[in-house]
Image (tube, coloured by chain):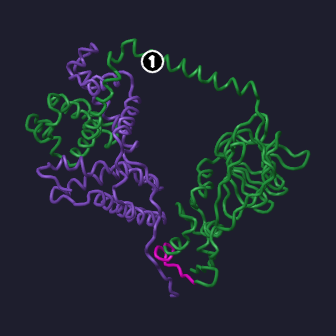
Amino acid sequence: MQRKNESLDEWFMRAVLPHEAALLRYISRHWHDNAIEVGDLCQEALTRVYAAARQERPTYAKSFLFTTARRLIYDQIRRAKTVQIDTLMDLEELEQAASETAQDETISARQELKHLQGALGKLPPKCRKVIELRRVHGFTQKETAAKLGITEAAVEAQIQRGVSRLAETLRHVSEFAAKRFELVRSRTHKEDER
Amino acid sequence: MTNAHTDKSLPPTEVLEKEAAYWLAKIDKAYEADEAAIDLDDYAEKNGEFASWLSSSDTHRVALLRLLAVWRRTHRLGALKSSHTAGIYAPKSLWPRRIIAVGAIAAAVLVALPLNFFQPDKPTQPTSVHQTLFGQRDAVALVDGSRIELNSDTRLVSNISSDERVIVLEKGEAFFEVAKEEERPFKVVAGDQVITVLGTAFSVHRQGSEVEIIVSEGRVKVQGAGSGASAAVLLAGYIATSGRSTAPDIQEDMARVRRELGWRQGLVIFDKTPLEMAAAEFNRYNQVKLVIDDANLATMRFSGSFKNDNVDAFVRLLTEGFGVHVVREAGKILITG
């Protein structure tokens, strides 16, 4: 998994960030407790993974990310006054999810382009024009400003807005094929009379 | 710091996101000659303000890396360039759309004409019985294009004639997705209740003389069997419960609609549901019955979703989470305090 001379940032973008959507989707599907904001939880988990990777990069980034998220959830549960009983059950499922292989997580370039195009289409018109000139046509920010007859500062502001919105849209339109994690319980148990 | 940085009215995550986007736009400009060379630490050496923002917290760096990853993904949009050749807002770009629109209308006319001319006979289907055994779930496609999902221990009879579509729900629960046909009403008869719809999705649950109707889409009309019985119209998100002699109790509660239709995914969904009712819900799907033998315990409330056949996991959580006492006997699991 490790690549020679890959910077920590590059590693993080390649090995960790692509799993964010899966984690986010998973948590929001099963998390019924509104007290914890799902996005905040994901962000916190990502930050902790980055911090930990400064010391040593985990071999299995996805499973490390999910485990980190689970620990955060446990912390929250311990702090919460009322416990949703299924929260505990869902966490077992989270472990299952993390151990799944990544084989069906690649999508075709065409699908990716479709997602991106969809996200682009959701931008406000002015913002979309700027992003199109910059990213589709490859003009520089300066050239984009000249084409549109606006200032470079305005182009920069639109890029700022555009990347934010694209991130928000693409966060939910995952680059992974949606998967259902079946609740598989390997643990057997015998209830003894106490 | 400048502009976005100082907006204190936003929640912390949104401020963070704005700050990260602010720097992304700067970095995009600084490296537009060679995008592959983007390196946050390299840029930090050139820009002191950025250096202090970046180094103050890993959260900052992670937020920016997320945007950078998205920005890199958008590089692929370059593939669209060929389809945008003449420039994106030349009036030319409008006209392929016009062709498509005209094409679509032409196609619609082609499709519509034969239907209007020949008025094909509506497909009919003689009386058929559909049923599920205890713990089973099934889906049935009717000849008119409607779909029925049967929950555990359910029996219904369908009759699709040329002038009406009638389903008699003899017992249990079923979810209906009704194909719209203005001239051929779709009726569900459940005990005393007759539910008439045009095109919608709803479920009917019959327990003896009590009937519960849950509407997830569109609208349905519910009428008692007697000639003078009044009719009620239910919209999406409504649940009506009625007994033999009582007027229907109608509630609007979309969350409850979703909860009560959890069985379609094989789930039981609780929302502050007393343990006793939760047990009854599990018992609709499992031969081994959960029996709550403690008055205090029976009123304890639970929230969340469970696989409806995974009563063992639920019991395990009761024992591990609440230290309840469990006695397993033939055909039942007794929970005592």
Image location (x, y in percent) of residue B276: 63, 70
Viewer-nearest residue: B182 or A125? B182
Residue in view at x 16 percent, y 60 percent: A56
Q: Residue A35 occupies which quadrant of the picture?
A: bottom left
Residue in view at x 18 percent, y 47 percent: A9
Is the residue A87 above or below the residue A194 in the image? Answer: above
Residue closest to the far bottom? A194
Residue in view at x 35 percent, y 23 percent: B83
Q: Is residue B243 in view from this perspective?
A: yes
Please state the total of marks drawn on the protein image.
1
For label 1, count other residues whose C-alpha is less than 10 Å away and answer few (under 14), some (14-19) or many (20+): few
Q: What shade has chain A been given?
A: purple
Q: What shade has chain B been given?
A: green
Label 1 belongs to which residue? Answer: B96
Amino acid type shown at disc 1: Pro
Lateral position of residue A5 relative to residue A68, left or right:
left
State which region is magenta.
B317-327
Give the letter of the chain under mark 1: B
Viewer-nearest residue: B117 or A128? B117
Q: Residue B268 occupies which quadrant of the picture?
A: bottom right
Is the residue B182 above or below the residue B259 in the image? Answer: above
Lateral position of residue B189 relative to residue A102, left or right:
right
Residue closest to the far right? B227
Lateral position of residue B325 relative to residue A145, left or right:
right
- Taking the magenta stretch, the answer to whether it contains residue B263 is no
Image location (x, y in percent) of residue A24: 38, 50
